[in-house]
Image: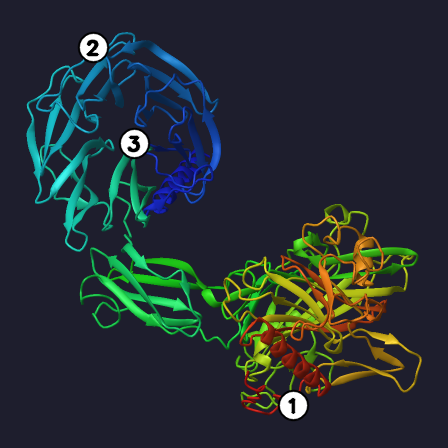
Amino acid sequence: MKKLIYFSIIIIQITCIAQFEELQRISIESNNLTNFQKSFVFESNGTLYYFYRLPGGQNINVESSSDYGETWNEYHEITGLPLRTLSERNFDIVQISSTSYIIAYLEFNSKLVILEYDLSTNSLERIGATHSLGSGVQEVEFTYIDESTYFASLKDTGDNVFYTRTDDGALTWSTNNSFPGVLSGNRPIITSHHNDNLYAAFAEENKISLIVSPDKGVTWSAPFDVFSNDKLISNASIHSDEENLFIVFEEHIFVNQLDDYQTDVCYISSNDNGDNWSDKNKYTKYIGNDLISEINYSSGKLYTLILSNRVNVNNTETYLGILNSTDDPAPPLIYWSDIPNLIDLDIDFNVRIFVLDESGIESVTALFNDEVYTLFDDGNHGDGAAGDGIYGINIPGYPSNISFDPSRAQTVAVNNIKLPINNSGVLATVLAAVTSRLHIDIFDTDSNYLSISKNITYRDVTGSDGRYDGINFLFSGGFFLSGFAGDSMWANGVVHTSFALDYQAGLISSDPNDPDNLVYSVRLDDPHFGKSWEDWSRAVEQGAYFYDGDGDGIYNPVDKNGNGIWDPDEDKPDLLYDGVYYTSYNDGVPASERRFKDIDPLGIEIRQSIYASYRNTILDDVVFIRYSILYKGLGDPAEPDSLTDVYFSVFTDTDIGDHIDDKAGCDTTLHSGYTYNRDTDEIFGVNPPAVFKTIVQGPIAKTGNSIDYGYNKFGPDIGTHSFQGYKNLGMTSFVAPQKSSSYLRDPYSPSSVRNYQHGLDDVGEKIDPCELAIGVVKGGLNCADVDSKYWFSGDPVTDYGWLYAIAMDLRDMTNTGPFNLIKNEPMDIIVAYVVGRGIDHLNSIDRAREITQYVHEEYERNFSTLVSVENKQEELPAQ
């Protein structure tokens, strides 16, 4: 049994040492940076214990590690310590046994206290008497010689260094004494007891001197030199591992490229009690700054803690190793990097990095969008002068016609309209930040390496607000729905500016934070059968449409013909025109979190697809949104089989440049509500655009007439679904609520939503066009002849009819209904956002009307303009 125990101990010690073949960064949860000026590591029975104090803290924390420092766990907090001095180095700890430690502690007002700490019970006990040292003493180094003899080395605020000692277990202390040959220093002189002698070492410029005491520090020899160096040295200290002596010091090396010094930790050793010393050994080899934090003896080893800025040149952290055993795989130093935060699509950009290493740089490479680029220091790649340590490369810009990876928010950026969207149905009021990660690997000639990464943001597709010509035109977009579930009226929606956010990402019963609940996009120029086509599989799982080339009902984007090009007998995404963006969301937000807190979820899913074109000059100013609305219910036997008398509203807060000078109107012939500017805009200038919100494909409603047909059109690939005895509804009313008004204000209740959808005021009264203060009827038109459901249906261009009278910050609702949502039968509504910009604010309305008319014609031909046409440049007449 004894042999087995002995063997186990040997294994533990060998394994522990083996785990420290290389310097290891200490990482703890309680502090992001382990930049402690003084901390300690001790070993006991195969477990490591890390003692440290948070900057400015009073207590000492203890963490333990059973995996040789790879992970640390909170173990103890040592409380009850005397009020500390200001210095972070006002204490020292030595290990006496596996559980017993001596803490030398400088109490406030320059008093030395000796405490015994029991690790197993987390208890403190004072030893001896408190010793007054004189004013200004801030730092202490402690040497335990035997049970009765202690030695304390001290430094005050004037950088005076001296010592005191005791032979009676700290009951009494000697007067303060100076070390021979040294009166000042930036740290206390560290001493080490070895083979019955007490040693002290100190550095001066480029040499190290040693003094020796044969009587435990009562008397000392004169200083004698033991080492000289060709570089400046500092912070020399001496330590014993019971077999050898080691003098550890910091060496300062001037680096021409930095025009500054860097610091390495070095040591010399002696195996004959200091009579002879080895040549210099480099403990650290990093070309940045490595500084000595603490070296303490435990279990036959000198645990060495250094502070290094090797991860971040501006911050130091603590690294652990064993002196004379641990190797330093010193990474190269990144002194600075010049990597842009923002880049533009299609535009090349330059990356530069200033990197140095003691052994030399072998390679610098950058990984960006799955491509690897080599950086050069040859003066020909935007890197500066050849051989100056600055490496550079020009990286091709990301193509604007290629899709990005799925994410929770993206910007629809196919043509002239830039529209941020998210995965819960919000349009424009979304901070979409589209980024790609740039990863740089640096290898030195010793195969040591360092990696850094940075997210680079694409300026064109980042930000909020719908933008046209780079200027905001849409602050927020969304929708309202209302109807009846049995006899109960309900209303919900996604209207950010009215705080109605009743829908959450994903399908019904899914976790909104599921990593697959994203916005998926495919662009025409994406590689066929490539990543975006594969990602579309997850979109299909969430209800996205697709072209089923092989007719098996399953989306499987495989190049069956092996030619790398899609053929009609192969599956592909629902790619209408030049880009599609898909996401799904449901009305699962609890009533308690809604604007209308008396409306519960009903089990409605919306599968939203956005399409756009950049190859048709007219459609360059249009985005199409398909809302595929599916009532699935929540599995309650009492819930109705259909939701009846349903209305759908396109709700927008349109801000054309300056938000306070907008007007609203509607065009009943084009099934559109629109926003235009009263005149010159402060941001857009003399020709601000007009923005139309158009019902392109309304919901189908039953007519019972066999000659009527309703349609759901998907484009030439998927085709058209027709429904006999039905018709598609158009715009059935238009209203323009006011932002902050007591009358006609933003929808504030289910009934106000419903009233607006019927073209009434918010309390359900019919509007009198001639009495409404914010409107005016012009051209001698009889008010009785104006259909009050369509607010401001006159023509601002000819100044005729019912017009908006007062420019302001306004909202509008383009409504269609009624229709029924039958359980598990989707209802598809297609909306177009159209931006027209002419030569002035009124000509912009005409321009938008012409585009909108073309949109309706394009719908009639099932979106077929660009099919099999490389570049269909249809144009409207010049303005």
In the rendered structure, the answer to whether residue 195 lies left or right of residue 320 reads left
**Going from the N terminus, do you reach mark 3 or mark 1 first?**
3
Question: Looking at the image, do the residues carrying marks 3 and 1 touch, with CB atoms under 8 Å apart?
Answer: no
Residue drawn at the location 39% of the way across and 73% of the way down: 347
Residue under circle 1?
568
User: Which mark's residue is nearer the viewer, 3 or 2?
Assistant: 2
Residue drawn at the location 76% of the way across and 84% of the way down: 720
Question: Looking at the image, do the residues carrying marks 1 and 2 touch, with CB atoms under 8 Å apart?
Answer: no
**The residue under label 1 is which amino acid type?**
Pro
Residue under circle 3?
297
Residue drawn at the location 36% of the way across and 43% of the way down: 14
In the rendered structure, the answer to whether residue 107 lies left or right of residue 428 reads left
Nearer to us in this view, 164 or 813: 813
Quadrant for the C terminus in the image: bottom right
Disc 3, SS: strand
Residue under circle 2?
174
Q: Would residue 575 be seen by someone viewing this image from the given angle?
A: no
Q: Residues within 10 Å of mark 3 (few under 14, many from 20)?
A: many
Nearer to us in this view, 35 or 602: 602
Q: Where residue 851 sits: x, y (%)?
A: 63, 80
Q: Where residue 392 sits: x, y (%)?
A: 28, 67
Nearer to us in this view, 440 or 266: 440
